[in-house]
Image (cartoon, rainbow, N blue to C red):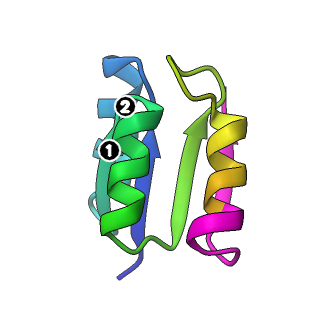
Amino acid sequence: MANILIIEDEDLYRNFLQKITSNRYSCDTAKNGDEAKTLLSRNSYDVVLYDLRLPGISGKDLIHFVKNEIDPYIVNIVIT
């Protein structure tokens, strides 16, 4: 089963994305970049869904973090 991380600051969208993905995949969520970095450092993910506009660390900066410091083979999908 693939592991997915959803990074979305708006509760409604984050919960919706988790609901539609969690039936088939293992799914974690983060509401900001700091939470995402913690999860990414502790867990292994196959796919990360990013909102570009996040409080604090931007989605774009998180993509660079994942590619350079976590795993360059994680599939990165941007949502906005």
**Cα separation between marks 1 and 2:** 7 Å
Q: Residue at x 36, y 47 (%)?
A: 20
**Few, some or many C-alpha atoms within 10 Å of disc 1 (few <14, some 14-19, many ≥20)?**
many
Q: Residue at x 47, y 35 (%)?
A: 33
Identify the residue position indicated by label 2 in the image: 14
Q: Up-down: is 21 above or below 2?
A: above
Q: In the image, which residues are magenta?
A: 67-80
Q: Is residue 32 left or right of residue 64?
A: left
Helix, strand or loop at mark 2: helix
Hey, what amino acid is under mark 1? Thr
For this orientation, the residue located farthest to the front is 69
Where does residue 77 sit, x and y in percent of width and height? 67, 51
Where does residue 28 sit, x and y in percent of width and height? 29, 53
Identify the residue position indicated by label 1 in the image: 29
Front disc: 1 or 2: 1
Identify the mark at residue 11; answer none if there is no mark: none
Q: Are marks 1 and 2 in contact (CB under 8 Å)?
A: yes
- The reply to whether the magenta stretch includes residue 70 is yes
In this rendering, the count of numbered labels is 2
